[in-house]
Amino acid sequence: MGDLLRYRRTQCAPRPTFESFGASTRFRLQIGLFPRCEQSFGSPHHYVQGRRYRLDIVATEGRQSVALRDASTLELRLHPDTSAAEREQLLQRWYRRLLRPQVAELIAKWEPILGVEVADWGIKKMKTRWGTCNTEAGRIWINLELAKKSPACLEYIVVHELVHRIERRHNDQFRELMDRHLPQ
């Protein structure tokens, strides 16, 4: 949340330039971490891995499901009496199944590069954070909303949380490690 608030304050500063931000913040701006995207079933569009899809709700008497029907359509097959809360729950389960192998692959890729190990990790819906790291337990949590963001954004957050296994605080050493490993 601190990063989001810092960015919002800089929007009010007199003519900030893209180059005036640190490398880590420039990268976050490039991959779309700001501003945070909120979606609801009132919206005709939803995002999956950074791409926008038109939401198409199809009535079915069979099994309820979520699928990318084509390059532009996210299809929800639902029973006619499905409530909004049940629709949201179905979509969140689908996002979680989509995100889980991606996070596992990124952790496996970055653990040896950074020289760290994660004892446990999980995905959960968080209101104010993209991820968290419990440095003592060696556990990281990734926000479910990252299933809607680009793969580069997800990778940035995973690396960010893994770097917390080396440096707990967002100090100069932390920023230097982030800039060294994700220099964009």
Image (cartoon, rainbow, N blue to C red):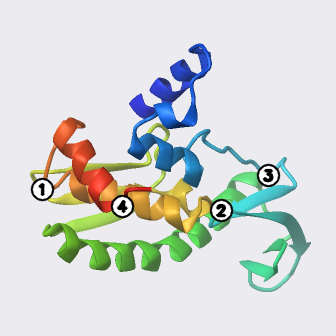
Picture residue at 12% right of the left edge, 56% below the top: 137
Q: Which numbered tag is attached to residue 41?
A: 3
Q: Earlier in the sequence, mark 1 or mark 3?
A: 3
Amino acid, disc 4: Val
Q: Indicate the position of residue 165 as horizontal and vertical percent values.
A: 16, 55
Does dot 4 land on a helix, a strand or a loop? helix
Chain-order first, disc 1 or disc 2:
2
Image spot of residue 64 (x, y percent): 74, 78
Q: Is residue 179 left or right of residue 123?
A: left
**Which of the numbered marks, if any, corresponds to residue 158?**
4
Dot 2 corresponds to which residue?
A: 50
As shown in the figure, which amino acid type bears the numbered disc 2? Gly
Secondary structure beneath label 3: loop
Q: Secondary structure at mark 1?
A: loop
Residue corresponding to mark 1: 137
Which numbered disc flags the more N-terminal residue, 3 or 2? 3
Element type where label 2 sits in the image: loop
Mark 3, mark 2: which one is toward the viewer? 2
At x 45%, y 76%, the residue is 102
As measured in the structure, the alpha-carbon distance from the residue carrying label 3 to the one carrying label 2 is 18 Å
> Dot 3, crowdedness within 10 Å: few (<14), some or many (≥20)?
few
Neighbours of disc 1 within 10 Å: few (<14), some (14-19), many (20+): few
Q: Looking at the image, is mark 1 or mark 2 nearer the viewer? A: 2
- From the viewer's perspective, tell me whether residue 49 is left or right of residue 109: right
Say what amino acid the circle numbered 1 marks.
Ala
Camera-nearest label, 4 or 3: 4
As measured in the structure, the alpha-carbon distance from the residue carrying label 1 to the one carrying label 4 is 16 Å
Q: Looking at the image, is 139 positioned above or below residue 7?
A: below
Q: Earlier in the sequence, mark 4 or mark 3?
A: 3
In front: label 1 or label 3: 1
